[in-house]
Image (cartoon, grey):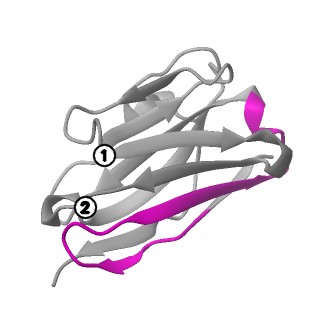
Amino acid sequence: QLQLVESGGGLVPPGGSLKLSCAASGATLNSYAIGWFRQAPGKEREGVSCITSRSGTQYADSVKGRFTISRDNAKNTVYLQMNILKPEDAAVYYCAADRLAFMCRNYVAAYNYWGQGTQVTVSE
């Protein structure tokens, strides 16, 4: 069974950068579409970005031009490069895998497997 583990979160000042990783085990990650979601306290989980098995990508309007999603099939890992971070980007970030590999679906219920999350804090 596919298992996902996120890493790379931390504390950064506004304007800083972080690179999140989503490492997979138990299955080949390029058989899935992979989404990054985030959830801030008191808010619903929201889609941030997605990459299909054919490396098509999608971004939420709030992160376009600042975040970049990519995948390294040899390492069975998907990344989320986050630049020009803002306080409103602070949240727990989750990666998730969708068996419908060839398209991005931007809703939680579409995803079959989830990681445990990694905390991103943006503050002075």
Residue 108 position in % (x across, y down): 40, 36
Q: Residue at 55% across / 44% down in the picture?
A: 96
Q: Residue at 28% across / 75% down in the picture?
A: 121
Residue 54 position in % (x across, y down): 67, 19
Check residue 66 in the rendering and tell me which mark sits there, or answer none.
1
- Three-letter amino acid code at the position of disc 2: Leu
Q: Is mark 1 on a helix, strand or loop?
A: loop
Task: State the residue position of label 2.
Answer: 85
In the picture, residue 60 is in which quadrant? top left
Q: Residue at 62% across / 19% down in the picture?
A: 100
- Three-letter amino acid code at the position of disc 1: Arg
Residue 24 position in % (x across, y down): 74, 52
Assess disc 1: are there few (<14), some (14-19) or many (≥20) residues with their C-alpha within 10 Å of its C-alpha.
few
Label 2, label 1: how far apart the Cα atoms are: 8 Å
17 vs 121, left or right, is right
Q: Do the residues labelled 2 and 1 touch (CB within 8 Å)?
A: yes
Query: Range of the magenta residues?
Result: 6-30
Mark earlier in primary sequence (2, 1): 1
Q: Which of 35 and 67 is in front in this view?
A: 67
Q: Residue at 75% across / 39% down in the picture?
A: 29
In the picture, residue 106 is in which quadrant? top left
Residue 107 position in % (x across, y down): 37, 30
In the picture, residue 59 is in which quadrant? top left
